[in-house]
Amino acid sequence: MPRRAAFCAALFVTSVLPLFARDYAARPTVQKVGEGVYLFTSSRHGDVGFVGNSVAIFSEEGVLVFDAGCVPSDSATVLAELRKLTDKPVRYLVNSHWHWDHWQGNQTYKAAFPGLQIISQENTRLLMRDVSVPRTQNDLKELPPYIASLEKDLAAKRAAHASEAELRDLEQLLQADKNFLAQKQSVQFTYPNFTFAESAAIWLGGREIRLIHAQAITSGDIYLYLPKEKILVTGDILVRPIPFAVGGTFPADWIATLQKLIALNPEVVVPGHGESEGARQALEQNLRLFQRVVQEVRNAKVQGLNEAQTVEAIGKKETELAAMIGITDAQLLPAFKPYFLDVFLHRAYQELDHSLSDLPPAAP
Ligand SMILES: [Zn+2]
């Protein structure tokens, strides 16, 4: 694990997901994934913020943006890129779920487009207020001492005459983390002003845009589907390269959701994090993995294993299970258990006894 894994796993879970490159440039990458449909991928925030995806759907009557990024600078850089591509206003902003990295850039769009409709599933709005905000306030307390520890680390390395390259890496990381803290401090919690329970449809400039509720990683997930163009935007129902189970997870419903998404037979799939290319296959791989894990949990329970024993026994198969979704890389493999398998196993076992609570077992 990276040296700061303990901090990251508890708080931000970022170091190995999904990009390794030390690229802290403020500019997002832009990719056209369909006619008038663009994917923006934000850059890293040191080792304390996610790389994530926002999708913009253009029309004659305006733009819909799906997910707003980690912090206001993410949404500001996406908006700057958007303005190069269209002069139409953003009319709708969708937050796929309550995790902070999908909605805490909302304020940028609201300020630029005062009539904006910010849309989420109704559970998500409550979870933003009751879970995401207190956790963010806690992050704001934990980030400064973490940054101070990096500064100490840097001073010690300077004193020990570490190589120039190592010092430069650490200096860049420190600056990126400081920028991120300043961004977190500037977040004005900007909640959805339109919520729905099961599904919504938006007809925008001749496009049909479907928003559909699922309970997969959280109780208020939304995925977006363009039926005519067969483009699917999954939010964190699909995260690549490793599914992210830490902030919730409803195994049976997640499996049912993956089955629904695959049945749509989409031509383009855009995940919440990670690449669009190959994402359709990743949906299928995730489905097979989840089904296998749930089956193993059932078998363990039948054999009389308790929850902790089940997690331990199946956890020993991490290498084999990770390979089912193509994770064989020695750098990625250590993240498979903490980000996916451990939480998924606990929740799958608990689900056999009772329905699961909304509240996830750990941050973000
Ligand atoms: Zn996310």
Image (cartoon, helix red, strand yellow):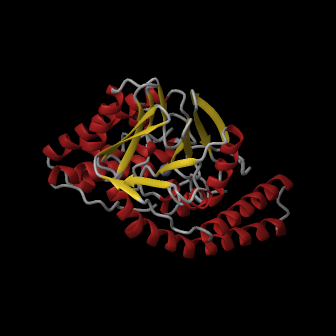
Q: Residue at x 67, y 40 (%)?
A: 29
Q: Position of residue 190 (x, y in %)?
A: 50, 64
Q: Nearer the viewer, residue 203 or 55?
A: 203
The percent position of residue 25, horizontal first and vertical second, equals: 74, 49
Query: In this orientation, which residue lies closer to the viewer: 309 or 269?
Result: 269
Q: What count of labels does the image hold?
A: 0
Left or right of 259 on screen, residue 78: right
Would residue 56 be found to the left or right of residue 131 on screen?
A: right
Percent of width and height locating residue 247: 40, 56
* Residue 43 at least partly seen: no
Image vertical order of residue 261 relative to residue 355, above or below? above
Residue lying at 23% horizontally and 43% vertically, measured from the top left? 297
- Determine whether 100 is above or below 302 in the image: below
In this view, 324 is above or below 26 = above
Find residue 168 and report its image quarter: bottom right
Q: Quadrant of residue 324?
A: top left
Residue at the spot 68% in from the left edge and 74% down from the top edge: 148
Res 47 seen here: yes
Q: Residue 81: percent from the left, percent from the top?
A: 69, 44
